[in-house]
Amino acid sequence: MSRAGRRASALRAVAALAVRAAPGALAGVLVVAVVEAALPVLAAWLTKTVLDALAEPGAGTSAVYVPAVALAGVGVAASVLPHVAQLLRAELGRRVGLLAQDRLYASVNSLTGLGRFEDPAALDRLRLAQQCGQDTPPQIVASVVGLARSAVTLAGFSVSLVLLNPWLALAVVISAVPALLTEIRLARARVGTALTVSPLERRESFYGFLLGSVQTAKEIRLFGIGDHLRGKMRRDRSAINATHGRLDRRAALAQTGPALVAAATGAGGLVWAVGAVAGGELTLGDVALLLSGVAAVQGGLAGIAVMVAVTHQHLMLFGHYLEVTTQPPDLPVPHDPLPAGPLTRGVELRDVWFRYSPQHDWVLRGVNLTIPAGGTVALVGDNGAGKSTIVKLLCRFYDPVRGSVLWDGTDIRALSPEDLRGRLSGIFQDFMRYDLPAGENIGLGDVRHVADTARIRDAAARAGMDETLAALPRGYDTMLSRTFTEDGAGDDDGVELSGGQWQRVGLARGLLRRDADLLILDEPSSGLDPEAEHEVHRLLLEHREGRTGLLVSHRLNAVRGADVIVVLRGGEVVEQGNHDELMRAGGRYATLFRRQAEGYTDVAAVAR
């Protein structure tokens, strides 16, 4: 699609948003804009009429006072309507912004996988869409309405100038063309600048988060890295400022010439008008109308030039919003997906090959793996062996490049992703710590029961956290954050949990979904002391009874009770079997297990 076509498409999308969000406010804005646009023209003609009546000997009282009273009425209307227009525009902007924001995040939430969240280019587009999604549509509406208002005013004064001097009217219009073209070129440059600085601004925001976050405060102060991060943030901000500075200097130089042309044209018109009055060709009222007309036409054309440029800029930026909201699915979903029924046979990875892009190496190489229904399979291996990638494929965050993942013999690509994930539950090492109340932090594990206090407390009890959470200042309603409060009232009762306590909250969240067929445990006991770790594994063993489980862990003592232990290395399955079989085989698993056992033996020997 051409640039003009993309801009037209963006304009239609904004118009549709405005009509859908606030049709009444939009109609009111348009009506008020037309009336506001007509008032200056009407005021200029009434002023001419009053001046000509005053200069006319023997003019009657009504010939002066009637247009004077009308002129006063126009002044009153001109003072009131801007406030009405501001009220309507604000309401229109709020409603359009709300609808645009909701559609943006509905589109983001509709993404099935993780690929676009792990792609820097896609993240930059999303950031631009977030920046302009809520504010840009109202700005475009306001700019278009402003264009319409200026066009009406400009048309009225242009007709007035033509009646006085057609050639002068033509000269005034032509003198504004360079400004219009200049502003359009600058609008394109501003969009290019926004695209250039977007990655820098995203990185600058990241440094700002690090410097102002409680999660990073300890390390930053312990290692003294605050000045280092501040220097990197300052470097990015300096680069952003330099880019904007270059654009500002370019704009100042480009706008000077057209401004001089417009000023010279206006001065020439004034000289001609003075001569015309002296020669009796024009009346004082005509001069007043002419001066108002020249100023209004030049100002209107300059304003139109700026608004066209601003609208052009906003439409180009809004294109990023449309890219995100109209993007095709990241993973193919069939039009009539099959439901994911209860797991009866098991989950299978069949000759699965996977890499994150053609530029990356293979992460998985022909993996064959079966997780039988009701059994527990453990994945072990070095960092980068492919364990986390297998978890992502099972959750259908990505699709295999080659091969397939089967749910009871059916390729999961044929299933509804929502149904599939409704059959899963997970406890991950990198679980989220939501700045939300304790009960909601757990309830998010199954939003169907986010308000079910009894169910939430049961999950917390099974994770060993019920007594701790119940003893908080507001019990399960206590904010697990010191960043902000839930109700915005400023109550200083939020708490920060320890790492181990947060781990148990994450466990409770994963245990809330009781009807899950497959429970994925990715380092579920990391951050816990040995006694707590033992207790957690006992709880998980009870919870997994009769269910299918996938356990990922570097602690081999935690996986020795699994039905099958699968050893990954370099993206391939190099061994599998139960603990005793793998120890007898003396392969990679036995080597790793003995190394960990030697570590504990050495510690025990030192203690003795």
Image (cartoon, rainbow, N blue to C red):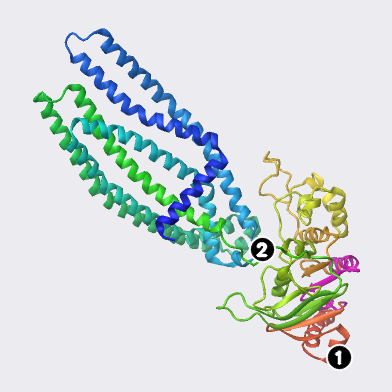
User: Which amino acid type is shown beneath numbered disc 1?
Assistant: Arg
Residue 564 coordinates in the image, percent (x, y): 84, 80
The residue tagged 1 is: 584
Up the image or down, 553 lies above or below 5; here it is below
> For the C terminus, which image quadrant?
bottom right
Residue 259 coordinates in the image, percent (x, y): 24, 44
Up the image or down, 302 lies above or below 193; here it is above
> For the N terminus, which image quadrant?
bottom left
In the figure, is residue 473 to the left or right of 486?
Answer: right
Residue shown at 75%/63% (left/top)? 421
Residue 102 coordinates in the image, percent (x, y): 61, 48
**Circle 1: element type:** helix
Residue shown at 59%/65% (left/top)? 116
In the figure, is residue 17 to the left or right of 219?
Answer: left
Asked if the stretch drawn in magenta spans residue 541, the answer is: yes
Closer to the eye: label 2 or 1: 2
Q: Which mark is residue 544?
A: none
Q: How crowded is mark 1: few (under 14 residues within 10 Å), some or many (20 or more)?
A: few
Magenta span of residues: 532-561
**Circle 2: element type:** loop
In front: 251, or 25?
25
Residue 461 visible: yes
Residue shown at 27%/36% (left/top)? 297
Residue shown at 58%/52% (left/top)? 104
Can you tell which quarter of the image residue 189 is in?
A: bottom left
Up the image or down, 383 lies above or below 167; here it is below
Q: Residue 112 carries which label?
A: 2
Number of disc labels: 2
Q: Which badge, 2 or 1, comes first in the chain's sequence?
A: 2
